[in-house]
Amino acid sequence: MQESAKSHIPGFYKLTQAERLEIITAEYNLTVDEQVLLNNEGGLQLEQAEQMIENVVGLYRLPLGLATNFIVNGRELLVPMVIEEPSVVAGASLAAKLARAGGGFVAATDDPVMLGQIQVVASPDPWAARVDLLAHRAELLALANEVDPILQQLGGGARDLQAYILETFTGPMLIAQLHYDVRDAMGANAINTACERLAPRIEELTGGQVFLRILSNLADRRLARARVRIPESALAFSEFSGADVARGIELAGAFAAADPYRAATHNKGIMNGIDAVVLATGNDWRAVEAGAHAYAARDGKYTSLSTWRRDGEGQLVGTLELPLALGTIGGATRVHPTARLALKILGVQRATELAAIVVSVGLAQNLAALRALATEGIQRGHMSLHARQVALAASNS
Ligand code: MEV
């Protein structure tokens, strides 16, 4: 889509909403309907909301901003972010601007493979049942593929079946784990349906009883990773030298890597950026949050999702890796009109392309927070925006 869109728009933040809308209308060829979407009465309508959840009594609105300056895998991007917290869009834009000095973000993803769990209890011998189950792997994968022939035509479908024994306070249980490529969907429905389809045959093969059949949000076969490399000289500002800023960020990274109390806050800063894009595109941010924090604790100790190191050659290098179960089809991504527009602005079709952008925004958000924390402190920038919110609240009371 908009391959040539330039995301570096100096002074974008100083414009009025109408002026910003004019710019993106031209840049993205927004239709009149799409422009209406972004104005006061546009966006999700009550009738659509009624199709999404139960007991609807109204609509709840949040600001949609565009982060500027992003380059991801060489592509210029304006990034739609939905969030209530001041400073997040500004922080992402600032960090993306710093990243431009090193060519922007490089990001890659695994295939979109989701994990499903089938819990088998009361097998006469769970260890023998495990072997019997795995002896029928090919048959079970074929059965899982019957659920969605179109997904298979698109290159998705069952990839693997694994099984392990868990010792629990109720006794041993056998867990079958289905690996299922869901292509451009978030994939919860696809994998849950496949797990439910396998359950009766798994009961026959194991002589046990199946209880839970559900995806795992620790989607660690569906990781997204990004890195950024910034010349230290580009980090200088105010009275702080680039080398000082880079050192401060490295020390902040070391603190988060070593201390769960700091890691929780550090990762929260990453999720500020990630959740805002996940929400803007109509994706399931609870799933992404669950996966991120479970992944941060995968070695038994909760730690930082990102790394920051000086390379000794005058560059600061940051990396971020986490599971990202995101879709560009299904769920609210296509039902919510503003989510559809967000995907259009991002110019993505594939779920893996979306994940590459989202992980880059997470890394940018982390950089913005650490840069502020390691220098002038977070409150300075934060408080001026916060003051605006307080004034707004006062004017409403
Ligand atoms: C605030 O929403 C996020 C930060 O606390 C993140 C961090 O401490 O790294 C500033």
Image (cartoon, helix red, strand yellow):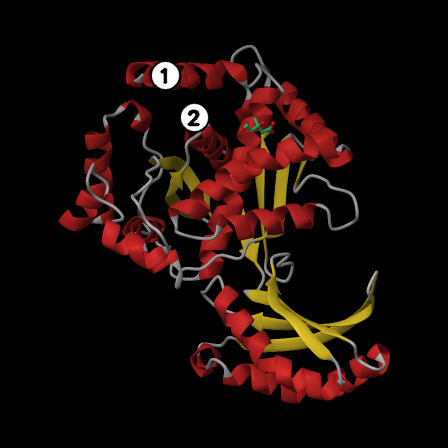
- Locate residue 293, reporting x and y percent: 65, 45
Above or below — where is 72 with respect to 308? below
- The reply to whether residue 209 is visible in this rendering is yes
Q: Which mark is residue 86?
A: 2
Structural crowding at the residue carrying mark 1, measured as other residues with C-alpha within 10 Å and reported as few (<14), some (14–19) or many (≥20): few
The residue to which callout 1 is attached is 388
Q: Which mark is residue 78?
A: none
Left or right, residue 321 beside residue 166 = left
- Locate residue 104, reporting x and y percent: 49, 41
- Locate residue 166, reporting x and y percent: 81, 66
Q: Which kind of residue does numbered mark 2 sit on?
A: Pro
Q: Nearer the viewer, residue 363 or 296?
A: 296
Q: Are marks 1 and 2 in contact (CB under 8 Å)?
A: yes
Left or right, residue 364 beside residue 52 = right
Work out whether mark 1 precedes mark 2 in sequence or the reverse, and give the earlier one. 2
The Cα atoms of the two marked residues, 1 and 2, are separated by 9 Å
User: What is the secondary structure assignment of the residue under circle 1?
Assistant: helix
What number of labels is visible?
A: 2
Taking the image in four quarters, ligand 1 sits in the one at top right
Left or right, residue 167 beside residue 263 = right
- The reply to whether residue 103 is visible in this rendering is no
